[in-house]
Image (cartoon, helix red, strand yellow):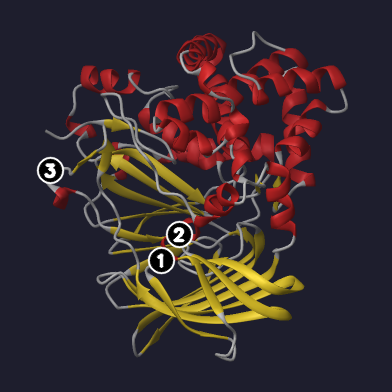
Amino acid sequence: MVKKTFSDSIGRQTRKPAHALFAFSGIFFIWTLFGFTAETAKAFVDNNRLHSLEVNGYYDPARNYLDATARLRFAEPANERYLWLAAGLQLSSVSSDSLPVLHFKHDSGLLVVQNFGESELELRYSGRLAPDDNSVETNGKQDIRENQNQFDDYHILSYIKDFYPHPLFDFTPMKTNITIPRGWSCLGSGTLLAVQPDAAGNKYMFDSVEAKGMTLVCGRFRQIGLLESEIPIRLHGWPGFQYRNYFNEPEIERVLSFYSKYLGTLSVPELNVLFRRAGNFCGISYKGLIVLDVDASWPRLSNQSRKKIEQESLLLMAGAQNDLLAHEMAHQWWGGLVSWETAFDNWITEGLATYSTLAYLREWQGEKTYRKTLCRLRQKAKRYAKLGFPAVGFKLKLMHRDLKVYQALVYVKPALMLAALADKIGQVELWGRLRSILKNYRCRNVSTTEFLAMLSDGDANMLARLKEWIYGNGLPGGL
């Protein structure tokens, strides 16, 4: 029997208690190996910042095969570089072919390249990437879903999966030119400059003035709609997919308009949204690109069945579709414009996206529904509040192997803190402080220390209370 799930951009939450160990990028490996704290991890980031990055290559989705060249220009010269590249990809050359490369821990994708005081590297690499996984980890066993052919197939080349060599996740100007066979379509983070035919297929050329990594999505989809909103929204899906069974155009435009009003206009020429029929609700958001997986059986379920599935989610607010849309749209600001500095700080983007969804609920469904939702979220988060705190970040997944713990502490608890802050200083004032953070850290990573300092606006007592929420166990009563 196919299990129904309701989830967000990081993972899935099953109707039964789920215990999943999620794959990490090699970035977390080096922090663990060397015992890095948040402060030393930040210093490591500062010494490996990119000035720009360009990737040119060929990708065959049917074989999941990639052959590419990456040119990395660093902000400062150095004698060696720590780079991550997916373990399935093999280097064929590094600059002049004479620089030694150490596979420091190959299964993590970590490489050490001697750079001899240079600030530029060019690497050629190829190989098959790890296959996309359409299964769910449930109680340590894979739940391979029945009727896989009912789901739409796409291949996602995410910067988190290290499909190009990089030192660490940071905002930098990026260009990607990728050729894929004819019959496939491609979307990417950043701006699509052109599509040109060549002997091997079609070359897609993307440019991003400043983005935190580049991501490509390849599949047999096509454009199925266009919303002429303040920022044009192009809707994509597979032939025959009826996105109106899940979302309507006014709602999509309204979410974008709400965030633009209170957080500022996005600096992208258009926003691409890809819909995919899947086994549950989940999504992921990159600069200018949102991928929304929707439960293929949802339109056939009764209202009672839908309600039962939704109520078992830790993150339930307005409903599966609306929550997913609002959360992933919010990541265009919290993640797309400002992101976390280290893995210990990722509560910032997830907490802000969760709170933004709450604020949208308050605007369109009223104060009574908002307060009722806050109460429900607090009750659910309280169950896990003694098991850690938000500033542990990604490490919570390794510590507990329980998605609900991670969601309660990294998503919900920070959102509750921001709701309490709105009650203390007023919603208008809070929007103002959040806009200031977006302005001052635009296209930059921000640490927990920096974020809380700006959020408290020089109030030492307020800063101390905010730290209780982020660095402390338990669930504070308020601010």
**For mark 1, what is the residue?**
87
* Element under disc 3: loop
- Which amino acid lies under the numbered mark 3 shown in the image of this protein? Glu
Examine the rendering and report whether any part of residue 148 can be seen. yes
Q: Give the residue at x 75% y 17%.
A: 465
* Element under disc 1: loop
The quadrant of the image that shows the C terminus is top right
Q: Can you give x and y, in whole percent of width and height, for residue 283 in the image?
A: 41, 43
Q: Are marks 2 and 1 in contact (CB under 8 Å)?
A: yes
Alpha-carbon distance for marks 3 and 1? 30 Å
| Residue 50 versus residue 417 in the image, above or below | below
**For mark 3, what is the residue?**
146
Q: In the picture provided, is 240 more to the left or to the right than 396?
A: left
322 or 50, which lies in front? Answer: 50
Quadrant location of residue 211? bottom right
Q: Can you give x and y, in whole percent of width and height, for residue 277 in the image?
A: 26, 46
Quadrant location of residue 278? top left
412 or 345, which lies in front? Answer: 345
Q: Give the residue at x 27% y 56%.
A: 238
